[in-house]
Image (cartoon, rainbow, N blue to C red):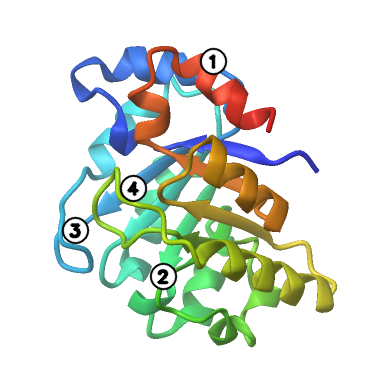
Amino acid sequence: MKHKIAPSLLAADFLNLQKEVEMINNSEADWLHMDIMDGVFVPNISFGFPVLEAVKPILKKPMDVHLMIVEPQKFVKEVAAAGAYMMNVHYEASTHLHRTIGAIKEAGMKAGVTLNPHTPISLLEDIIQDLDMVLLMSVNPGYGGQRFIEHSVNKTARLKEMIREKGLETLIEVDGGVNLETGKRLVDAGADVLVAGSFVFSSPDPIRTIKELKDM
């Protein structure tokens, strides 16, 4: 399967949000990644459901929603109503993870679990069979434009091995510091989906940049 590209709206120009979404629609991007931050679980606040709802009628690509918030299980219905294809919750923020994953699927979405850079993949041993995707953070969550954490490549490879050993089709998504160089190494290690924020939206030609990421 060809890897997917999910540009992160967090890096977009919010004064021209419709134009940015239309650019995504006209590009080879597969998904649009949406980071919701609460200033509690991560040290930053991004945007909430009104932005998702505003984007929903004009977006032609699946919406990949990443909740960097405490108690994400409280917002499953809101994320589904906003039109999300995938809902990602953090392992570190989910006390009853199995129950939350079940609720996400019952709401008609795909279910993803996100791991911070310090969180070992071994903690997914008893839940990975229920997941559609695992999102590995390759920077510490909360801000865009951070330096890529190098051990993320090896972590991706080890997670891919776990998935293959169990005979699963769980996708691996990686978010943070993705460019043509790090992206190629991550795809070679087994990543299925790459999230790219500032590398895409700060590019002089974002549509071409997305194509280059897709063609690696």
- Residue drawn at the location 52% of the way across and 37% of the way down: 6
Q: Nearer the viewer, residue 43 or 189?
A: 189
Earlier-in-chain disc, 3 versus 2 = 3
Q: Amino acid at mark 4?
A: Asp
Are the residues at dot 2 and dot 4 in contact (C-beta closer than 8 Å)?
no
Residue that mark 1 sits on = 208
- Looking at the image, is mark 3 or mark 2 nearer the viewer? 2
Q: Is residue 138 left or right of residue 165?
A: left
Counting from the top left corner in percent of width and height, residue 126 is at 63, 87
**What is the distance, in whole Å, between disc 4 and disc 3 at their CAs?**
10 Å
Instruction: Look at the image and tell me in which quarter the N terminus lies.
Output: top right
Are the residues at dot 3 and dot 2 in contact (C-beta closer than 8 Å)?
no
Q: Is residue 184 left or right of residue 136?
A: right
**What is the distance, in whole Å, between disc 3 and disc 1 at their CAs?**
32 Å
Residue that mark 4 sits on = 35
Residue that mark 3 sits on = 38
Q: Amino acid at mark 2?
A: Pro
Residue 208 sits in which quadrant? top right
Please, what secondary structure does the residue beneath circle 1 have?
helix
Please, what secondary structure does the residue beneath circle 4 have?
strand
Binning the other alpha carbons within 10 Å of mark 2 as few (below 14), some (14 to 19) or many (20 upward) gives some
Residue 58 vs 172, above or below: the answer is above
**What is the distance, in whole Å, between disc 3 and disc 2 at their CAs?**
19 Å
Residue 122 sits in which quadrant? bottom right
Counting from the top left corner in percent of width and height, residue 60 is at 54, 23
